[in-house]
């Protein structure tokens, strides 16, 4: 993992990103709409 450049996101990466982004997005939407 030292000098590796990522060109494509793997399914695991997308899942990890989604697991962070989705709750934050939901929280933001909740704050804006209320």
Image (tube, helix red, strand yellow):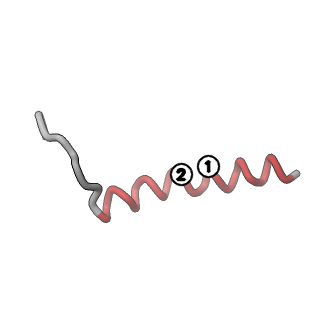
Residue 4's x, y, as percent? 13, 40
Rendered image quadrant of residue 15: bottom left
Front residue of 9/13: it is 9
Task: Identify residue for label 2.
Answer: 21
* Crowd class of label 1 (few under 14; some 14 to 19; many from 20; radius 10 Å): few
Residue 1's x, y, as percent? 13, 41
Q: Which residue sits furthest right?
A: 34
Label 1, label 2: how far apart the Cα atoms are: 5 Å
Left or right: residue 2 versus residue 23 is left
Front residue of 27/9: it is 9
Give the structural element (helix, strand or loop) at label 1. Answer: helix
The residue shown at (71%, 47%) is 28
Left or right: residue 10 versus residue 31 is left
Rendered image quadrant of residue 16: bottom left
* Crowd class of label 2 (few under 14; some 14 to 19; many from 20; radius 10 Å): few
The residue shown at (88%, 51%) is 34
Eyeballing the image, is 16 above or below 31? below
Left or right: residue 13 versus residue 1 is right
Task: Identify residue for label 1.
Answer: 24
Q: Which residue sits furthest top?
A: 3
Contact (Cβ within 8 Å) of mark 1 with mark 2:
yes
Eyeballing the image, is 26 above or below 3? below
Give the structural element (helix, strand or loop) at label 2. Answer: helix
Left or right: residue 29 versus residue 1 is right
The residue shown at (31%, 61%) is 12
The residue shown at (25%, 55%) is 8
Residue 19's x, y, as percent? 49, 57
């Amino acid at each position: 993992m030292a000098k590796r450049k990522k060109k494509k996101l793997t399914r695991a990466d997308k899942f990890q990103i989604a697991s962070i982004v989705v709750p934050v997005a939901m929280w933001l939407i909740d704050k804006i709409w209320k």
